[in-house]
Image (tube, rainbow, N blue to C red):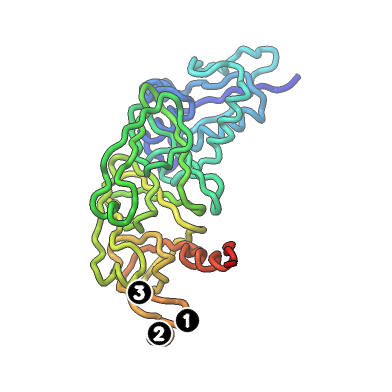
Amino acid sequence: MQNLYNVVITGELAAGAEQSAAINAFAALFKISEEKAQQTFSKAPVTVKTNIDKATAEKFQAAISKTGLMCRMDEVAQGDELAVANEKSEALVSTAATSTDVAKTERIASIESPTSFKGFSYKIEGRPDYSFLTVQIPADKTLKVEASAMATMDTHVVMKTKLKGGLGRFLTGESLFLNEFTAAKGAGEIGIAPGTPGDLVHQHLDGNTIFLQNSAFVAATMEVNLETKWQGMLKGFFSGESFFLIRASGKGDLWFNSYGAIIEIDVEENYVVDTSNIVAFTEGLDYEITKVGGYKSLFLSGEGFVCRFTGKGKVWIQTRNAQAFTSWAHYFRPVQKSK
């Protein structure tokens, strides 16, 4: 006879986990309200899955542990398959694990979450070539997303479009609008596909500020403030990039993307990056646009201008340059021969 197991919430939190964030993630995992999830946690120890095989129990345990709530597997005594190991049994899930339940736990178990468990639960798939972001939105919470980036969402997630662009986004050709997705009547899930083929990075802001290239923003929670920052005529003109940056500040989740893979670099004093490879950098770093070498190098080397960072902070760079790619692809375009 196959051994069966119960999965039990112990009422403890993982090291570094915040209770509210963990409960929100648990609510998103089982598609229940935050209130229901809180009630479940308050009754701990409580059994949330009963009489399932070991492999399935391990998948549920891994998924639940990702939320920040501690859980354990209890073997059911043989000959008493309806036993719940003297624990309270919670009716938020059925006693038999369905194939959908198992598939969902496998997806949730692969979530890439900050170790502090702060913010919304999420996962990033397809890195670094064609990154796809899935975010679990807690009940009655809202996520703002770049226009045209939503790929999938639960049916009860409600979308509203807000004018958030400003002059900077208008002048650079970006959309003047952001879409806001609210998980009404329970936690919901949204899938986000950025426009460019490349990597995607998450940062949890805690009062700090990150500057993004104008096209790098993907999504953020409502507590993150997004503003357009004027670089100045000199920096914007010589960089070959936008005259404007996006200033992201406040407290909450921020996701941004690139063309190509993203590499995070810790700057201690000085660092030089080609202007076309910059994705984002932290506040506190000063920068100026300069030549790599002399004027001969400027026009003949193909390198152009670079950004010289000074100070202490982080810079995120992309491994590919869109301008370099279009120049390379230009020679392969079909040309109609003149008669």
Give percent across and percent down for residue 17: 41, 40
Q: CA distance from mark 2 to mark 3?
A: 13 Å
Reading the image, the residue beneath label 1 is 301
Reading the image, the residue beneath label 2 is 293
Q: Residue at x 66, y 21 (%)?
A: 4
Please give left or right for residue 224 compared with residue 83 in the image. left
Reading the image, the residue beneath label 3 is 308
Three-letter code, disc 3: Arg
Under tag 1, what secondary structure?
A: loop
Tell me, yes or no, whether the two marked residues, 2 and 3, touch with CB atoms within 8 Å: no
Q: Residue at x 43, y 84 (%)?
A: 297
Give percent across and percent down for residue 328: 54, 68
Three-letter code, disc 1: Ser
Give percent across and percent down for residue 117: 42, 41
Give percent across and percent down for residue 90: 48, 17
Tell me, yes or no, whether the two marked residues, 3 and 1, touch with CB atoms within 8 Å: no
Of the residues tagged 2 and 1, which is closer to the observer? 1
Tell me, yes or no, whether the two marked residues, 2 and 1, touch with CB atoms within 8 Å: yes
Q: CA distance from mark 2 to mark 1?
A: 9 Å
Three-letter code, disc 2: Gly
* The C terminus, quarter of image: bottom right
Q: Which mark is first along the chain, 1 or 2?
A: 2
Q: Residue at x 60, y 14 (%)?
A: 83
